């Protein structure tokens, strides 16, 4: 049998956490709304993104797409543009696809059942739990990195398996105020029970916490060994023709899917880059001066990108490729979804 708490202790944890959360919660824009759409959007943004980073993105997003219907009717490119810089772009593409599905199959209302929610693109176990508990006030557990750390410490289980974390979260979440309880657990992990130097002295559950009693709360959970990111070298080229920069659109799936970028090739020499430009656009180019090198870290990749100027050797942008390739004026760049990496690469090129 795994870790557990007596009913009395469970009630104490619930009561203390909820009381603490009512007083200590941060004032965040999505907390002022009970609209399931806004809760879904914020919970999606907050996966892999820090709260402070997510706030302005969230505000711009709901101003532009205030409802599921508005998001379902949006162009993927508009959605990606508002997401640009936030990373993990599959989240944005899935949100739009899921919105379409919600309008088509559920009359524009987020479904309440776990099964129907889990069928939506991009909605995993965490989002299902967040929606069921926060939006629909059902006693459904959620486990994210913060919750996992709090549970690992509360029960002093250093190598807390995911399945065990979900089981414990499921035992703890109350039928009454499950929304407040789940948010309290996450908030405690984010602001008090932090990875380093947890503020045990002000923690509402300090008297029950086994890790604190051990005197070494930071030892919980044991650090996970992360695989070393794979080193990748790539070459990118900036072609400027009459003040316009050549951009290509990435396929809509996979890393940075649907975003625009300057032509680039991974692990390949310069002729492959020139060939790529000719094949995808019909334009002829030659390799010019080196502009610089950018290091960029993705979750699994450590990218070293060499950026060169491309010399214009003629040719016309073929009409058939214009939705996938365009010569873009500098002031139009702000209108396109570009990753941070591409913004850095474009910043290396001399202004036309
Ligand atoms: Fe975390 Fe300390 Fe609270 Fe335990 S007492 S839950 S280690 S902040």
Image (cartoon, rainbow, N blue to C red):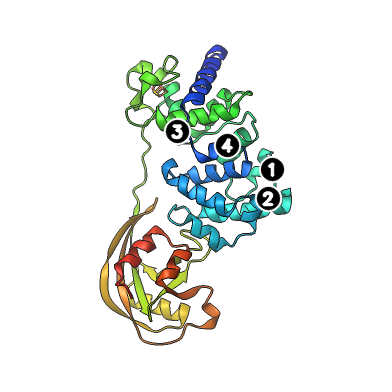
- Classify mark 3: residues with Cα within 10 Å, few (<14), some (14-19) or many (20+): some
Q: Position of residue 330 (x, y in %)?
A: 40, 71
Q: Secondary structure at mark 1?
A: loop
In which quarter of the view is residue 308 placed?
A: bottom left
Q: Position of residue 143 (x, y in %)?
A: 51, 34
CB at disc 3 and ligand 1 closer than 8 Å: no
Mark closest to the chain's N terminus, 3 or 2: 2
- Classify mark 4: residues with Cα within 10 Å, few (<14), some (14-19) or many (20+): many
Is disc 2 in contact with disc 1, using a CB cutoff of under 8 Å? yes
Q: Position of residue 44 (x, y in %)?
A: 53, 45
Which of these two is toward me, 231 or 34? 34
Mark closest to the chain's N terminus, 2 or 1: 2
Mark closest to the chain's N terminus, 1 or 4: 1
* Alpha-carbon span between mark 1 and mark 3: 27 Å
Extreme residue toward the bottom, this view: 314
Q: Secondary structure at mark 3?
A: helix
Give the numbered dot on residue 111.
1
- Classify mark 1: residues with Cα within 10 Å, few (<14), some (14-19) or many (20+): some
Which of these two is toward me, 78 or 14? 78
* Alpha-carbon span between mark 3 and mark 4: 14 Å
Which of these two is toward me, 223 or 282? 282
CB at disc 1 and ligand 1 closer than 8 Å: no
User: The C terminus lies in which quarter of the figure?
Assistant: bottom left
Give the numbered dot on residue 130.
4
Mark closest to the chain's N terminus, 1 or 3: 1
Is disc 2 in contact with disc 4, using a CB cutoff of under 8 Å? no
Give the quarter the ligand 1 occupies: top left
Q: Which residue is mark 3?
A: 146
Extreme residue toward the top, this view: 8
């Amino acid at each position: 049998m795994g870790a557990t708490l007596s009913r009395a202790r469970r009630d104490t944890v619930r009561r203390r956490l909820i009381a603490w959360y009512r007083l200590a919660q941060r004032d965040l824009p999505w907390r002022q709304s009970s609209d399931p759409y806004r809760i879904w959007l914020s919970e999606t943004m907050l996966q892999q993104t820090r709260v402070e980073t997510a706030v302005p993105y969230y505000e711009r997003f709901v101003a532009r797409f205030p409802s599921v219907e508005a998001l379902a009717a949006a162009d993927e490119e508009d959605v990606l543009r508002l997401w640009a810089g936030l990373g993990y772009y599959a989240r944005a593409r899935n949100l739009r696809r899921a919105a379409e599905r919600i309008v088509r199959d559920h009359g524009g209302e987020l479904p309440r059942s776990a099964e129907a929610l889990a069928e939506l693109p991009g909605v995993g176990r965490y989002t299902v739990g967040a929606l069921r508990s926060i939006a629909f006030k059902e006693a459904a557990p959620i486990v994210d990195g913060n919750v996992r750390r709090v549970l690992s410490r509360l029960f002093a289980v250093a190598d807390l398996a995911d399945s065990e974390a979900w089981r414990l979260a499921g035992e703890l979440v109350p039928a009454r105020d499950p929304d407040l309880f789940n948010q309290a657990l996450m908030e405690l992990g984010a602001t008090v029970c932090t990875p380093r130097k947890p503020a045990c002295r002000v923690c509402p559950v300090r008297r029950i916490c086994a890790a604190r009693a051990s005197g070494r709360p930071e030892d919980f959970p044991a650090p996970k060994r992360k695989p070393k990111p794979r080193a990748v070298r790539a070459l990118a080229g900036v072609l400027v023709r009459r003040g316009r920069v050549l951009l290509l659109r990435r396929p809509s799936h996979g890393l940075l899917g649907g975003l625009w970028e300057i032509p680039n090739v991974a692990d390949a020499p310069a002729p492959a880059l020139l060939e790529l430009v000719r094949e995808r656009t019909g334009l002829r180019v030659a390799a010019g001066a080196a502009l610089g090198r950018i290091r960029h870290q993705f979750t699994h990749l450590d990218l070293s990108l060499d950026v060169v100027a491309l010399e214009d050797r003629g040719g016309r942008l073929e009409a058939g490729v214009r939705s996938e390739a365009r010569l873009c004026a500098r002031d139009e760049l702000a209108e396109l979804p570009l990753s941070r990496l591409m913004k850095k690469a474009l910043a290396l090129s001399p202004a036309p």
